Image (cartoon, helix red, strand yellow):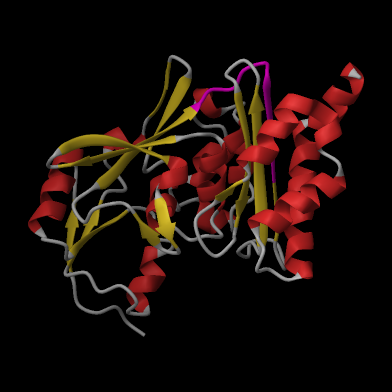
Amino acid sequence: MKAAKFEYARAFGVDEAIQVLAAGGGTAKAMSGSQSFGPMLNLRLARPARVVDVANIPALRAVNRKDEWVEIGAAVTHAEIEDGVYPPLAAHPMRQVAGGIAYRAIRSRGTVGGSLAHADPAADWVVTLAALCARIMVRSPRGERTIEADGLMLGAYTTVLEADELIVAIRVPSETPATRWGYHKVCRKPGEFAEASAAVYFDVSRQRARVVLGAADGPPILLNEFAAEIARKGAQAVGREKVSAAISVALPDRDAIDRKLFTACVERALEQSGVFSNLKQAE
């Protein structure tokens, strides 16, 4: 199937892209890597009157460290993060996640901002950035605003973004010696969308503790009470029974097999983070 007819515009600056989006009156859509948006056009699931290509805007292709944050341009690709192209992300937890997204061909074109705007519940960045307490920088003719990553999605493929808003950057906390991080997902085979995923992030120096479930058919699910219990009680709080209980509360309508998948994701993410070993040594 071919895409429905649309006008194509390539923007060379953020302000230009925003003007084109605003002029569309809700009928224009921004396109970056096009790895999700392209198929949606061809299947006619998306029928914008105008597509605004923002993939090569210099301001969206930069990565900079700002105090305790790393600011990532929205058009930075998964492959660039995977390859450590940008020094501020060379040792960052995001590099681990990037290497497991889909296939290399998709990672070479797919972008962080595009993935967030697409808002697939099974997407890696959706759950990862929610766990990292990331901030999404969005710009429109009305100015710039910040959206917490865990508040971006309203539902599957639905976000709080307005039609004339463009994601310009994502701010993630820089790594510290106290950072403990893990991410695990379950797929039928490598490269496919996750059936269950979980990301954990602990940093005592910043008083942050997050355990987040992804691929749950909607926005990421934050297990805040469970994460706080781990941070407060340590190894005593992270036994399998505790994990299973937290999953059952978060996903009461899922069957036993689904809950086991999510339980396994949380357990393995916690193991990756080193929470078990570090706390056992402290005991």
Q: Quadrant of the C terminus?
A: top right
Residue 117, position as x, y percentages in the image: 37, 53
Viewer-side residue, 58 vs 25: 25
**Residue 13 in view (yes/no):** no
Q: Quadrant of the N terminus?
A: bottom left
Examine the rendered structure and indicate whether residue 141 appears above or below residue 10.
above
Q: Does the magenta run of residues contain 92?
A: no
**Along the horizontal axis of the image, is 91 left or right of 129?**
right
Figure quadrant of residue 8? bottom left
Boundaries of the magenta span = 173-183
Figure quadrant of residue 159? bottom left
Examine the rendered structure and indicate whether residue 22 appears above or below residue 158.
above
What residue is drawn where x is 60% and y is 64%? 193
Q: Does the magenta run of residues contain 181?
A: yes
Instruction: Name the residue at the left extreme.
Output: 23
**Along the horizontal axis of the image, is 102 left or right of 34?**
right
Residue 161, position as x, y percentages in the image: 29, 51
Examine the rendered structure and indicate whether residue 7 appears above or below residue 1.
above
**Residue 257 in view (yes/no):** yes
What residue is drawn where x is 67% and y is 59%? 196
What residue is drawn where x is 62% and y is 17%? 176
Residue 119, position as x, y percentages in the image: 43, 57
